[in-house]
Each structure stands twice: as structure tokens, then as C-alpha cells.
Image (tube, rainbow, N blue to C red):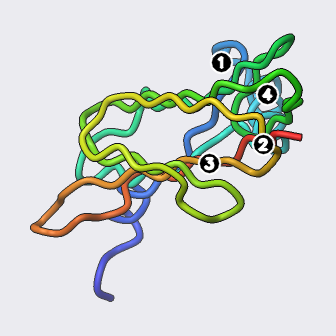
Amino acid sequence: MIFPYEFHFRTVNTHVILADSLIGDVNADKKAIYAALEKGHCFVGYDLPAATRGFHFTAQGMDKTAIMGDEIPAKGGVTLQARIPSEAEIRLLKDGVVIKTWKKGLSCTHITTEPGVYRIEVYRRYLGKLRGWIYSNPIYVR
């Protein structure tokens, strides 16, 4: 075994975005977590180089705000925003293709009227190499 399971469970994590805090009731909390996962309200973080807690990726349209996993109408324009916990390279992808890169940032903003599947990838230096740190779920601009 190269790395024990415990090592991996502490390093690569799925972070779930909940509408409300967990309340300590196992059944209610489980239901809230599964509902958020079903909606795609989550992201994957490689927490070994640095904590990924605090990452946010949202979209603001004319009449609606969306988070990862949500759809939002493109009509009238959509402002995509990401905020990361510490400085790193942020890449915005549309339909799987990088459309914009911020080399050293804590946040980024991009305005679009184009429908597509938008997501964020964040990279940071760790052990001498640029490595994937945060991978968002998409926001669907329709």
C-alpha cells in the first residue's frame, strides 16, 4: 500500500453547500446532505496543500442567484463570481474549455450572456509543482 486510506480521506474531500447548518439530528442532517449532493451543491477540494473551506462559486442574473449545480437564465447577462480561501491560480471553464485565467487571485468575476456549462478549477504550488486544488461543480447558464 503506497498511501493508507486514512491519508486519502484527509486530503481529498467533497465539500457540501447546505442552505442551513446541520442541527445534530442524524436523519434530518442526512436528508439535507443528500438533497444538496443530489442538486450538485458541492465541490471537490485537495486539502493537503491548504484548506479549501470557504470556496464559493456563484452566478447572479437579472432575477436569480445560482450556486454550483443550479441553472440560471442567460437573458440579460449573468455575473459569475468565485472566491477562494488563499491566493492561487483560478481558471474559468465554459463547456470544458478554459476561457479565462487569473494567475494570482483571491477572487474573480466574469460577465457573460452566452449559455453554457461554467465551472472553476483552482491550482496552487505544492511540493514544487502546480497542482489541482479546487474543482467546482458547474453552474448551468441557459
Image quarter where the N terminus lies is bottom left
User: Between disc 4 and disc 3, whose residue precedes?
Assistant: 4
The image shows residue 95, relative to residue 101, as above or below, that is below
Question: Is 126 displayed left or right of 134 in the figure?
Answer: left
The residue under label 2 is: 114
The image shows residue 128, relative to residue 124, as above or below, that is below
User: Between disc 2 and disc 4, whose residue precedes?
Assistant: 4
User: Between disc 3 and disc 1, whose residue precedes?
Assistant: 1
Residue at 77% x, 25% y: name it: 77
Whether pointer 4 and pointer 1 mark residues with C-beta atoms closer than 8 Å, the reply is: yes
The residue under label 1 is: 22
Residue at 81% x, 39% y: name it: 141
Q: Nearer the viewer, residue 82 or 6?
A: 82
Amino acid type at mark 4? Ala
Task: Measure how far apart labels 3 and 1 are at the Cα level.
Answer: 26 Å
Question: Is 42 displayed left or right of 123 in the figure?
Answer: right
- Discs 2/1, front: 2
